[in-house]
Structure formats: structure tokens, C-alpha cells
Image (tube, grey):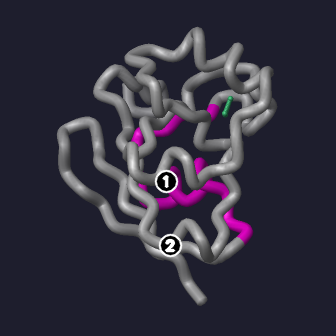
Amino acid sequence: MSITVTFIDPRGKPVEVRAEPGDNLLRVGQGAGLPLEGTCEGQMACSTCHVIVATEWFARLPEAIEEEEDMLDFAAGVRRTSRLSCQIELTEDLDGLTVTVPAESTDLRRM
Ligand code: FES
């Protein structure tokens, strides 16, 4: 079964992406061309993979561990439902997941 994830890009445009269970949310977003830098490649040493999860989906994700919470403190435009996309592994239960790439995100690859 494939999973559909909707990314809302920093301009507010929805980008629908197909993924497979086990895929990493950061990689899926990068593959779709979204400006998610992911500098540390999932080591929780940056916050450039920050996304804001739609409220209705937030509680359905496994809880963030303390290191992720700490790193989110450094993210620009952080909200109550913010997560590091590199820490989210997609499962069938997450089919329909919607996340926003904050307007504050910068992608150095595009500068
Ligand atoms: Fe650095 Fe997610 S890629 S914390």
C-alpha cells in the first residue's frame, strides 16, 4: 500500500506526494523538491528539517523524544505541532498526513 502525504510549501501551495511505509518524511519531502535542507541527515543536530504537522495528525505520530524537543527549540517559526521531519517514519496509519514547510525555512542549496 502506498501512502499519500501532503506538504504545504512555504508559499501555501499543497504538494501531494506518494510514499511507501518505512520511508522517511524528510527524504520524501526532499524528493518532491520541497525546501527541507536536512543538514545533519537525521542526526538531530540541526533543525533544518522542521515541519509543522496538521493539528489533526499531530497526536497520531509517535511522540518526540527529548533530543528532538531540544532541537526544535532552535527551529525558526516553531509551533505547538512542530516536528523534525527526519524523525518521522511513514506507516500505513499515516496515509493522508499533512505537514507545512514553514515560510521561515531556508534551503541553502537554493541560495
Ligand atoms: Fe537535522 Fe533533522 S535533518 S535534525
Q: Is residue 106 above or below residue 51?
A: above
Is residue 49 one of those drawn in magenta? no
Alpha carbons under labels 2 and 1: distance apart:
15 Å
Task: Give the camera-side residue of 36 and 61.
Answer: 61
Packing grade of label 1 (10 A; few <14, some 14-19, many >=20) is many
Tell me the amino acid under the disc marked 1. Answer: Gly
Q: Which of the marked residues, 2 or 1, is nearer the chain's N terminus?
A: 1
User: Where in the figure is residue 101, as x and y percent of width and height?
Assistant: 38, 38
Task: Give the camera-side residue of 46 and 72.
Answer: 72
Point 38% across, 46% down: residue: 54
Q: Name the residue under label 2.
A: 95
Q: In which quarter of the image is ligand 1?
A: top right
Task: Give the camera-side residue of 100 and 107.
Answer: 100
Quadrant containing the N terminus in the rendered view: bottom right
Q: What is the span of residues highlighted in magenta in the rendered image? A: 22-38
| Residue 103, image quadrant | top left
Point 49% across, 38% down: residue: 36
Tell me the amino acid under the disc marked 2. Answer: Asp
Point 35% across, 30% down: residue: 102
Q: Name the residue under label 1.
A: 29
User: Where in the figure is residue 32, as x and y percent of width and height?
Assistant: 43, 60
Q: In this view, does 89 lie above or below 74?
A: below
Quadrant containing the C terminus in the rendered view: top left
Q: Is residue 3 above or below residue 107?
A: below
Per the image, label 2 sits on a secondary structure element best described as: loop
